[in-house]
Amino acid sequence: MMKVKRGPWGRGSWGEAAAVLDPSKPKLTTSAMIASIASEGQRTSAAPFGEALVKVARERPDILGLTADLGKYTDLHVFGAAFPDRYYQMGMAEQNLMLAAAGLAHEGFTPFVTTYAVFAARRTYDFISQGIVEEGLNVKICCALPGLTTGYGPSHQATEDLAIFRGMPDLTIVDPCDALDIEQATQAIAAHHGPVYMRLLRGKVPLVLDEYDYRFELGKAKLLRDGAEILVISTGLMTMRALEAAQRLEADRVGVAVLHVPTIKPLDEATILREAGRTGRMVVVAENHSVIGGLGEAVAGVLLRGGVAPPRFRQVALPDAFLDAGALPTLHDRYGISAEAMAGSLRSCLQ
């Protein structure tokens, strides 16, 4: 039987079509397209982005929703159902999508644009840069399937989107961790004037940060838990993984601090330098992104420029490679971003 390693180029829900097929292994029962990262029995919230945007839009008639044939798969369909006269389905034309949003922003509207992160980063970069960001327009680009949150393979896995967008001047970049983070971040970017790129977790999104007295603030990092041996600086879903790994290491009497960095740009350098500068702790940066060009290299630059030298510095990130297609639990283990894999990485860092 042929082994399928690369995902299809289409964007529909193809079920098992993109799963890695190997007759010597048990059949995978998880669809490659399922983007939920929730563990069995974990608390979740349905469509937090769509629900939060509806709440904001009730008080803000300037807010519009635009998508490129992906309303259902970015949770923008929730907004469309509530405000059909403010919802625009642009079809499979991402470049037109961005320029249409730019035109609407010029007229005083606040467009929330959704697509997949790979399409925004790869297909529309120049249109975002020249048509939206250089003009300082109030467009919010909110993209599903960031990093390794789909099993469709390189055609759909946005493993380099942060590296692509971090170099764009004047663009705010947000990478929320869970449903609470997405809800609060959506409210915050709606209140912020200027272009924003936000990574989205969609569907039934885990809910974890409500246990940590957390409140999203644009441009601010938050220390969720303290620990004497390791400081994990994390963003996006890897903050969730870091918290899970820290709990596992408690049994080994290893103290793991977790500093959540939901805003990649502008980076909260002062908090990072303060926490990384505490004596004796090694620093591990964890992100659902390539090891190249993301939060890890951004933090390394901050530490170097700030004259802070932790005893050791490590990264937990995706490899600089085109990743396989398959079921997400398998891929997260394979590429080291599951809770179990991350706990193992942290243990090995201490040896």
Image (cartoon, helix red, strand yellow):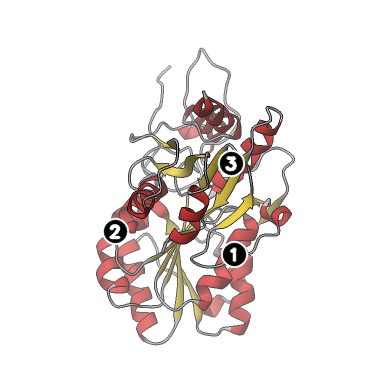
The image position of residue 57, as x and y in percent, is: 58, 78
User: Image check: 293 left or right of 70?
Assistant: left
The residue positioned 34% from the left and 76% from the top of the image is 102
The outermost residue toward the top is 24
In the rendered view, tell whether residue 341 sits above or below residue 42. Answer: above
Q: Which amino acid does label 2 sit on?
A: Gly
Q: CA–CA distance between discs 2 and 1?
A: 24 Å
Q: Mark 2 points at which residue?
A: 167
Say what secondary structure mark 1 lies in.
loop
User: Image check: 62 left or right of 249?
Assistant: left
The image position of residue 169, as x and y in percent, is: 29, 66
Determine if residue 116 is in view: yes
The residue positioned 33% from the left and 70% from the top of the image is 170
Determine if residue 235 is in view: no
Q: In which quadrant is the N terminus drawn?
A: top left
Say what secondary structure mark 3 lies in.
helix
For residue 216, which numbered disc appears in the image? 1
Q: Neighbour class for label 2 at 10 Å: few (<14), some, many (≥20)?
A: few
Q: What residue type is labelled 3?
A: Ala
